[in-house]
Image (cartoon, grey):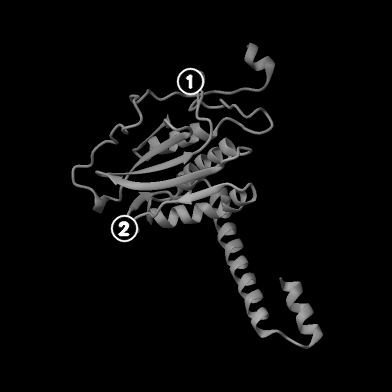
Amino acid sequence: NAVLLQQMASRGGVDTVRMEQTAKVIANTAERISRITRSLLAFARDAEADPLRRVSLRSLVEDTLDFCRERFRRQGIDLVIDPIDPDLALDCRPVQISQVLLNLLNNAHDAVEGLDDRWASISASDVGDFVEIQVTDGGPGVPLEIRDKIFQPFFSTKGEMDGHGLGLSTVKSIAETCGGSVAFRNKAGGGAEFSILLPLASDHCSPPRQRAPHSKISGHPRRALTILLAEDMPEVRRA
């Protein structure tokens, strides 16, 4: 678009309407790149050291979508964003919640890639003192034989070159660190639905603060903390 402006200026006969449209595209693209750059810099830091901040859930979702919207568009995947109440707010580390959303959206993308009917959706609603964020896809769902494994570190169905197996375990870890929970179910008509429960900002809650309720779709109790130690040197593993 910048080259187009140069060509129009060099020819002399400037089409002001077209120039204005082209300049607007350049400005919007630059702003999008700026937002993505700021977000990448934030992702590069250790979010554990960040203080909790009050953020609008709707703004957080919109900022996260900057990372993946184009990827969905290129694959012809219909990404449906249900309206989110602008008053819903979280006391959180925004980078961590963006990680959660991005991991779930990337999984939804991979689940429908190559299908004839390609779609995914994200929605959010308040559930008492918590907000429930749902990421749903129109893929084949989670096979029965791996449902108990998908939140385990390093478990992946994508192969060594396409997945490291840390996405859903990271989602689970962050959700529970924030005082929430994660659950999933296969929908009757096909597809998977992942649900994240996170505490609403304190002034939205009725004291005292409750523990995260079991989601209506979860069906599993809280589990004890598991510490995983990985070692890639055979001589150390044999010791």
- Give x and y (percent) for residue 204: 25, 52
Q: Residue furthest right?
A: 11
Q: Residue at x 58, y 23 (%)?
A: 230
Q: CA distance from mark 1 to mark 2?
A: 38 Å
User: Image height check: is 186 above or below 35?
Assistant: above
Label 1 sits on residue: 144
Residue for point 53% across, 44% down: 119
Q: What residue do we see at 59% from left, 37% from top?
A: 110
Q: In the image, 185: left or right of 143?
A: left
Quadrant containing the C terminus is top right
Q: Residue 176: which quarter of the image?
A: top left
Pointer 1 local density, CA inside 10 Å: few below 14, some 14–19, many at least 20 = few
- Taking depth in this image into account, of 156 and 170 the one nearest to the observer is 156
Q: Is residue 57 above or below residue 197?
A: below
Residue 224 pos. (x, y %): 38, 23
Mark earlier in primary sequence (1, 2):
2
Q: Amino acid at mark 2?
A: Asp
